[in-house]
Amino acid sequence: MFLFTTSPTPRDATRSPTAAASPVVEAIRQGAEKTGTGFDYLLATARRESSLDPGAKAATSSATGLFQFIEQTWLGILKQDGPSLGLGAYAEAITAKPQGGYTVSDPSARQAILDLRRDPEASAAMAGALTRRNRDALSAELGREPTRGDLYAAHVLGARGAAALIRAAQFTPARPAAADLPEAAAANRSLFYDKAGRPRGAADLYAHLSASQSGPPPAVAAGSPAAEAPTAFAPEDGIGLRSLFQTDARRGPVSEGVARLWQTRSPETAAPSYFPRSDGSAGGEGTAATAAAPKIAASETAAPLVGAPLPPARPPEFGGLPSPALARAGRP
């Protein structure tokens, strides 16, 4: 399995005078080195998520710290990657629940573990580990190397939510993204709606998320340990129905027509919960976010961002689909 890395450069080559003196930036650099994740990507993510404030706290969820981890995502990634990153003692105190999710039996230990999100070094290391897992999940789902924009979408929406957004941006670009990701839209209204309150289309939202991650995808280096299954998203409901649209040999929609039918399902049908920034427990943030999710008519559209960058198409060797423009033109 491959991990992200940056090309070798002198340690001061990417530092501005301000960055060189910042312990937060240095902590992010160390996290990138420990996990093989691109420093530029992690730095840009932390800037967008918290403006490099280790004590940042979201008003709509439990998201906290440089990278705005919610409680369950933090417990899960720390449980699985903490031992390899020098946080084994904390990982041992975390228990995976049979029904899903993670818990810590001792209240004081739980609080100490959650407070680690405000530690720049721990937060950066866990962000690198999560990026590594999201990269593996998106590679499998998309059949190609994820771009930095893809990875940031996964950081915000979870790997499955990002994959759904990427496909929608390709096949139904003007369809309101909130119709397919209502929980995420309820907790991050400023992402899914513009200043006038109009819902962003899938392509517009993808471009909006990618804006802080301009640049080529990170290079990869071989020889790193394989990561386990990603943990930053909730299990998808309706897996039996989804199997009608997929095969074991190839991930993704069977055809563009099927993808459009799938994306234009009734808005009254509950969408799978992809969003990693709500805890999803009964009476918790996930319940409140779902209750507050706006209903959007399937016919409602938002004008896509002019010149918005779309995610790359699936490569032909992975059974890639032609672009919608080529399909309409009748060309292979």
Image: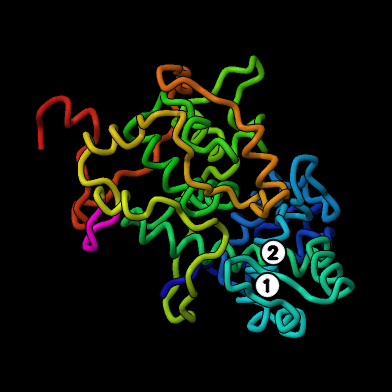
Where residue 15 appears, x then y in whole percent?
A: 71, 57
* Image coordinates for residue 167, horizontal then vertical, percent: 36, 41
Q: Residue 74 carries which label?
A: 2
Element marked by disc 2: helix
Which quadrant holds residue 20? bottom right
Residue nearest the observer in this picture, 7 or 280: 280
In the rendered image, residue 250 lying in the magenta stretch gets the answer yes
Residue depicted at x 63% and y 69%: 77
Q: Position of residue 235 (x, y in %)?
A: 49, 58
The quadrant in which residue 213 appears is top right
Query: What's the residue at 36%, 61% (across, down)?
Result: 140
Q: Are marks 1 and 2 in contact (CB under 8 Å)?
A: yes
Residue 84 at x, y = what percent?
Answer: 63, 83
Q: In this view, does 147 lie to the left or right of 12?
A: left
Residue appearing at x 30%, y 44% in the figure: 313
Residue 199 lies, with reference to residue 84, above or below; the image says above
Please identify the dominant SS of the magenta region: loop
